[in-house]
Image: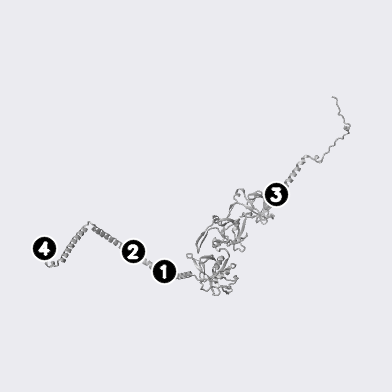
């Protein structure tokens, strides 16, 4: 088949007039494709590194006393059982007195690297608050953390050696209690209000002077609203047994307090009415009493101090003994000591007492119709001038325990005067407004019961002079003679008495035989009595005839009468 050439357009150039295309290439095109793989790998590594930097949390250092249970790469940091970090290293401090744990916190846990955050090692523990950390027996120890509301960042922390009793987010208030001794209270001991556990003991330490113990407690909300200015705290642990002027008393607390100790509190009351007082802020200080009676005995308010002087033996009067007015608790004894009276140049017994201010105020209102609530000491001074005096009384005869009774002198008696320390007396109208310089001394009077005791002591002293030993020897001789007499009676008189009794028994039996109704003796007696009766009848007839015919004694009985 012949080749036919395509028709040509008049405007189209010829084929030989078109230039040939040129082929160009870039450096990327000239680069071998095998080098792209390291480049992509490097870019991915940089991206991952930047991502890890962006997601990495802060690193902190926590100080602990020992590294027990801490293992780098294994020990976790947990908050409410959620992992928030990991221990990356453990090293000794420069002075080798403690260890530092290096912790890497996660990005979402960077809020724990602030001021106030607490760290501790969770291990199995047995404490007053209970048994904790048993789950670590299988999983191993871990570091617990408690959050803080601070915003200040921090890198170094001091870890706790024991778990905190109260977590930072729990609502409530802290208070400080001061006591002479720690007693049965320990860290974690419960705090009770009306036998309901409302808090715990946080920690304790000696006070600055070393004369007491400061105990920090935490009362949870909403129970912290029941802590007022007149709230009283006492140790509720163990069993409280008291034997005093009021007799024997036994107080027990809930089982938790018996085992681990505890603290209880209640608002003081006056005459059965609770006096709440003003609310107190967190951190307020209170006194911790040894038992409930001591805590609630003052009934609220400040106590008024006074001194009593006695010239006789006060054995049986102890610190804490009650002071009463007509049987109503009015205070308690705070101290006893020996004092020297320079004026009399003699030794005396000084007894310090504390009187309850509110009840003192009530007594002032009843006695004087006026009161100065701003100065209870002045009220006491007025009462002393009205004739208030103190006297020792026997509270428990078996225990020989004493108490102090207050009373007023009769109206006819001369009232006492309040004495200044400088010896200046003041009249009733002249009581100074400032009684801080007054030596509030309540006059005392001898106790009649104590006089009776002294008389009894003198009587016992006289009884000791009786020759009891000599009397005992003579009594022993008398008893020996009596024993000999009884022996003779037993060996000689008793057999004879037995024979006599047997003979008497035979006689009585014979008499009983003769006294039978059908016995011969009874028949003879009956016949004799019958004949005697007939004789008496004949004699009676004769007597009657002679009364009618007395001449018959001379002439005899007439024939016709005889014939008849």
Name the residue tied to disc 2: 486
Q: Quadrant of residue 300?
A: bottom right
Q: Position of residue 476 (x, y in %)?
A: 38, 66
- SS at badge 1: helix
The residue sitting at 33% across, 65% down in the picture is 485
Name the residue tied to disc 4: 560
The mark nearer the N terminus, 1 or 3, is 3
Q: Residues within 10 Å of mark 2 (few under 14, many from 20)?
A: few
Q: Is residue 251 above or below residue 426?
A: above
**Viewport quadrant of the C terminus:** bottom left
Rounded to the nearest angstrom, the CA distance separating label 1 from label 3 is: 101 Å
Please indicate, yes or no, whether residue 459 appears anywhere in the rendered image: yes
Q: Position of residue 452 (x, y in %)?
A: 46, 70
- The answer to whether 530 appears left or right of 23 in the picture is left
- The answer to whether 51 appears left or right of 144 in the picture is right
Q: Position of residue 120 (x, y in %)?
A: 63, 53
- SS at badge 2: helix
Rounded to the nearest angstrom, the CA distance separating label 4 from label 2 is: 86 Å
Mark 4 or 2: the one toward you: 4
Name the residue tied to disc 3: 56
């Amino acid at each position: 088949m012949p080749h036919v050439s395509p028709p040509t357009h008049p405007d189209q150039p010829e084929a030989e007039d078109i230039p040939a295309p040129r082929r160009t290439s870039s450096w990327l095109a000239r680069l071998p494709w095998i080098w792209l793989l390291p480049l992509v790998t490097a870019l991915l590594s940089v991206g991952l590194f930047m991502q890890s930097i962006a997601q990495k949390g802060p690193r902190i250092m926590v100080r602990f006393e020992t590294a027990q249970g801490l293992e780098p790469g294994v020990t976790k940091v947990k908050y409410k059982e959620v992992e928030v970090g990991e221990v990356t290293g453990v090293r000794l401090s420069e002075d080798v007195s403690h260890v530092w744990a290096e912790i890497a916190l996660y990005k979402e846990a960077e809020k724990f690297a602030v001021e106030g955050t607490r760290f501790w090692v969770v291990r199995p523990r047995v404490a007053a608050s209970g048994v904790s950390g048993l789950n670590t027996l299988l999983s191993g120890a871990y570091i617990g953390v408690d959050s803080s509301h601070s915003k200040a960042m921090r890198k170094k922390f001091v870890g706790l050696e024991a778990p905190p009793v109260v977590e930072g987010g729990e609502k409530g208030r802290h208070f400080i209690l001061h006591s002479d001794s720690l007693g049965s209270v320990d860290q974690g001991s419960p705090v009770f209000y009306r036998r309901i556990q409302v808090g715990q003991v946080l920690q304790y330490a000696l006070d600055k002077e070393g004369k007491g113990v400061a105990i920090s407690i935490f009362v949870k909300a909403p129970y912290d609203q029941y802590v007022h200015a007149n709230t009283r705290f006492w140790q509720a642990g163990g069993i409280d047994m008291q034997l005093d002027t009021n007799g024997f008393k036994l107080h027990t607390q809930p089982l938790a307090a018996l085992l681990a100790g505890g603290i209880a509190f209640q608002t003081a009351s006056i005459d059965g009415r609770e006096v709440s007082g003003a609310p107190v802020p967190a951190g307020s200080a209170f006194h911790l009493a040894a038992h409930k009676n001591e805590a609630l005995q003052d009934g609220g308010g400040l106590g008024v101090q006074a001194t009593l002087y006695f010239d006789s033996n006060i054995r049986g009067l102890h610190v804490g003994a009650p002071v009463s007015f007509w049987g109503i608790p009015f205070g308690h004894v705070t101290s006893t000591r020996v004092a020297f009276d320079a004026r009399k140049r003699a030794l005396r017994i000084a007894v310090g007492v504390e009187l309850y201010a509110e009840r003192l105020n009530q007594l002032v209102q009843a006695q004087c119709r006026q009161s100065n609530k701003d100065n209870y000491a002045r009220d006491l001074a007025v009462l002393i001038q009205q004739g208030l005096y103190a006297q020792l009384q026997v509270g428990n005869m078996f225990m020989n325990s004493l108490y102090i009774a207050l009373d007023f002198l009769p109206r006819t008696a001369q009232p006492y005067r309040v004495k200044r320390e400088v010896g200046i007396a003041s009249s009733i109208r002249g009581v100074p407004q400032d009684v801080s310089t007054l030596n509030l001394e309540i006059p005392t009077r001898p106790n009649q019961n104590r006089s009776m005791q002294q008389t009894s002591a003198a009587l016992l002293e006289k009884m000791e002079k009786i020759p009891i030993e000599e009397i005992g020897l003579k009594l022993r001789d008398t008893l020996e003679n009596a024993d000999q007499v009884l022996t003779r009676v037993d060996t000689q008189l008793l057999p004879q008495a037995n024979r006599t009794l047997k003979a008497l028994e035979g006689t009585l039996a014979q008499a009983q035989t003769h006294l039978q109704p059908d016995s011969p003796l009874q028949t003879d007696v009956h016949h004799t009595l019958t004949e005697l009766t007939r004789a008496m009848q004949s004699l009676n007839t004769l007597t009657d005839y002679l009364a009618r015919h007395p001449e018959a004694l001379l002439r005899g009985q007439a024939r016709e009468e005889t014939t008849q």
